[in-house]
Amino acid sequence: MNKKGQALVEFIIILPVLIMLFFGAVDFGRIVIRKNELESITSDVVKLYKEGSSYEKIESFLKENNENNTISIKNKDNEYVEFELQSEMTFVTPGLGKILGEPYIVKSKRVIYYDE
């Protein structure tokens, strides 16, 4: 019996699984990094808002920092302001987009209530 041939066949069978696991870990790392970036930008937006900046100034700040982000600003009956920042991601790992949805939307959200 040829042990070298058997080891080669086993390696060839396992290799695609290992490659998928590696690229899956890379994609999840990219998601975590992007989420962290959005959280940081959202904190900056909240600081600008608390300093009295207008919505237009906030949107221009976002376009200067990263043009791939979309922001949603909602003012609900002057009770609170909601800032939601989102960004789209595509995956490197084949098939991961079918599981998580492609493009994958990474979101960061802050709600500021008015003090009375």
Image (cartoon, rainbow, N blue to C red):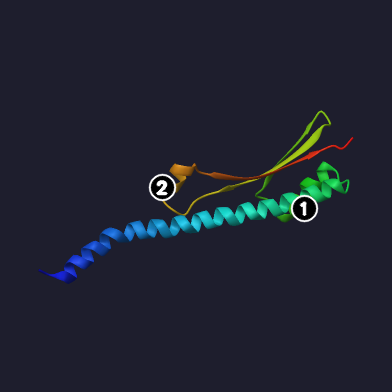
User: Where residue 103 sits: x, y (%)?
Assistant: 53, 44
Q: Quadrant of the C terminus?
A: top right
- Reading the chain from its start, which is encountered first: label 2 or label 1? 1
User: Where residue 90 sits: x, y (%)?
Assistant: 52, 49
Total count of labels: 2
| Vertical placement of residue 68 versus 13, above or below | above
Going by the picture, which residue comes out furthest to the left?
A: 1
Q: Quadrant of the N terminus?
A: bottom left
Residue type at mark 2 is Gly
Residue type at mark 1 is Asp
Nearer the observer: mark 2 or 1; the answer is 1
Which numbered dot is residue 64?
Answer: none
User: Where residue 36 sits: x, y (%)?
Assistant: 64, 55
Look at 82% across and 28% down and name the residue there.
Answer: 77
Look at 43% across and 60% down and name the residue there.
Answer: 22
Look at 45% across and 55% down and name the residue there.
Answer: 24
Going by the picture, which residue comes out furthest to the front?
A: 116
Lateral position of residue 90 relative to residue 12, left or right? right
Which numbered dot is residue 95?
Answer: 2
Lateral position of residue 45 relative to residue 53, left or right? left
User: Which residue position holds label 1?
Assistant: 44
Lateral position of residue 50 relative to residue 36, left or right? right
SS for tag 1? helix
| Vertical placement of residue 110 versus 29, above or below | above
SS for tag 2? loop
Q: CA distance from mark 2 to mark 1?
A: 35 Å
Front in this rendered view, residue 79 or 101: 79
